[in-house]
Every structure is written in C-alpha cells, then in structure tokens.
Image: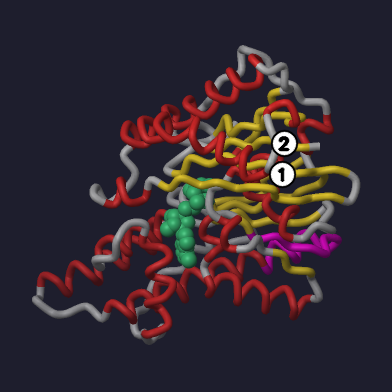
Amino acid sequence: MYILGMESSCDETSAAVIEMGEGVRRIKSDIVASQIDIHRLYGGVVPEIASRAHIEAISKITHEALDTAGITLADVGAVAVTTHPGLIGALLVGVNFAKSLAFANNIPLISVNHIHGHIAAAYLTDTTLEPPFLSLVVSGGHTSFYLVNDYTDIAEIGGTRDDAAGEAFDKIGRVIGMPYPGGAALDKLAYEGDKSKYRLPSPALIGDNLDFSFSGLKTAALNIINSANQKGEEIDRASISASYTHTIVRGIVKKTSLALDKNADVKTFVLAGGVAANSHIRAALDELCKSRGIKFIVPDRSLCGDNGAMIAAAGYYEYLRGQRSDTSLNARATDY
Ligand code: KG4
Ligand code: ZN
C-alpha cells in the first residue's frame, strides 16, 4: 500500500510517498522544503516564521510528492502525520492539512510521534530490519535511548536531562561564527583540529544510568571561547570543534556501551535523528558495534534529518496495529 507521510514539527516541511507491504519497503518520493535559509538570519528557528513558511509550502510539496511518486490521492491507503513533539504552531499546520486531506478523500488518518519517525527511517534503510533492537535518537531536541520491543512498542530507557546533542552542537557552532545550524559545519571543521587541545566535561552522567547532560559541556566550551575573546586571543576554532566533538562522541560511546551491557539480548543497534548524520558519531558507534558483534544500522544521511518518508514508515506500522485518528486529532508540543 501507499502511505503519504507529512512532517512539519520544526523547520522542514516535508511530504513523502512510500510503498509498504509484505517484503516491500520503498520510498517513491520524499520532498523536503527546508526553511534553514530563512532562520539563518536569526541564528535559530523562529517559531512564528516557521509556521507561516509551512503554510506556504505544504500544499505545493504534497502535490509534488504525489506527482513524483506517480500516484494520485485515490491510490493513497493512509495519511500519516507528525502530531508531537515539536513547535506547536508548526505541528498544527501539518496536522490540519493532513486531517482535511484525509477526511475530504476518505483516507485513514494516522498520528505519528516524531521520534518514532526518526527510528522508523531505519526500516527504509535496511529493508530486513525487524524489532527488537536498541536505538539512540540524537536530534536537535532529543538525545535518548529506546528499546524498540516491537514496531509500535517503543520504551525510552534513558535520555538527556537538559539540552540535546543537536542544540549543543548548534550553540557552539554559532559562537564560533558558523552559519545556523552549526552541527554539519562543526562536523567538518573538527577534522582540522587537535581533539586533545581543550579539556571539557563529559555529557555522560556519572553512574549506572543511561542519561546525558549537555549543559555543563556547553557552558565549559562557552567559557573557553568567551575568556579567549576577552583577552583578545584568537580561539583555535578547529581545535575547539575537535575537542567538543570528541567529548560528545566519547560520552555517547560510553552510554551506548552501557545500554548494550544492560540489554545483552539485543543484537541490533540503530542510530537515528538529525545528529546521526555526524560522521564522527557514525564511525565511533560503527566501531563499537563491530567490536561487540552487534549489527549497526544508521539511516542514509538524507533520512537522518526531518522528512516525510520516516513519518510514513512509522505511520504504516501504526496503521497495521489498527490505529485510526478522527477529526479530534490535535498536535501537542510534548513527547507524551
Ligand atoms: O532531527 P533533526 O533534523 O530535527 C529535530 O528533530 O530536532 O535534527 C536537527 C539537528 C540540528 O541540531 C543540526 O545541527 C544537527 O541535527 N545536525 C548535525 C549534523 N547534521 C545535522 N549535528 C552534528 N553533525 C552533523 N553532521
Ligand atoms: Zn527530528
């Protein structure tokens, strides 16, 4: 069957068509209208501007997704839409559009958790992947471990107590003069620096837990940069990027190792979310999994950031479980 997936939780408006069925997981189209150039002017996402940009883009990209897939609404078996978590005004655009489309055309409407969508991107990358597995979602708003017991049975077993990894990358990127969002730029710059030049506190919380805290690390890096600025010294941007990235990678590897220890029956590990595009994190977790005989899966970079195909994939499994939403469907900012 064909599923139309719609995503508008932050600064990308996306619509996608995927084909799912017995032994079939295929992306037919995945159209993403990014607002990054608009928000770059402000150094971060401006919620009100995001909502307006979603309104302008959503109808056009939905048509584009259907046309590229070579189908019409009559062929769509379900409309899946991100309902939470995210920016409320931004989410409402996608939810109301999907609702109208579904009810006007008599198509089942499915509500999707954005984080479950990030995890579901892995089903489109490895078409043989099946639960159970362990997953780490690293994005602009989340850094959490999940036990994926079944396609729609997903339990959070640890996560950040404050900032997310993506936020932490973007903040330091901004203060060293990188264009928003700084994550991808820091990824590249880190190769040119000395990773042991600056000592920074680990984001892995001490103790037998699967939790992170990125705020101390972020503040420590900011202090180094600010004090250099105050003294009129030039900060070594490449080395602060390398040290910062190295500290994040080590923290993530440490907690992933512990998560695998605690769930010894799990044989597959899935890395997902926008920050999963980071080459240092991908390489380190690949190595960790190899050394432990665990299968490592990370979505193609195009499926790591927010996109409609991942929402459609999560929506398909919700559909199979029997989830059907009605006209009372609403968006919410929170995870729960
Ligand atoms: O999942 P996502 O597209 O949106 C949210 O759900 O939050 O993640 C966006 C985040 C941004 O913070 C961005 O800087 C980060 O992903 N990101 C990266 C890289 N590419 C994107 N962070 C580190 N390295 C990258 N290569
Ligand atoms: Zn996301």
Which is nearer the eye, 180 or 132? 180
Q: Is residue 29 left or right of residue 236?
A: right
Q: Which residue is mark 1?
A: 18
User: Where's residue 22, x and y in %?
Assistant: 90, 45
Instruction: Tell me which segment is drawn in magenta.
Output: 257-271
Mark 2 → mark 1, Cα distance in angstroms: 5 Å
Residue type indicated by callout 2: Ile
Label 2, on which residue?
A: 3
Please provide percent x and percent y for residue 260. 74, 64
Q: Residue at x 60, y 55 (%)?
A: 303
Image side of residue 324 versus residue 196, left or right:
right
Q: Is residue 204 magenta?
A: no
- Quadrant of residue 261 within the rendered picture: bottom right
Q: Secondary structure at mark 1?
A: strand
Q: Front-most of 312 and 69?
A: 69
Amino acid type assigned to the residue bearing label 1 in the image: Ile
Q: Is residue 198 above or below residue 209?
A: below
Residue sticking out furthest to the right: 22
**CB of mark 2 within 8 Å of CB of mark 1?**
yes
| Quadrant containing the C terminus in the rendered view | top right
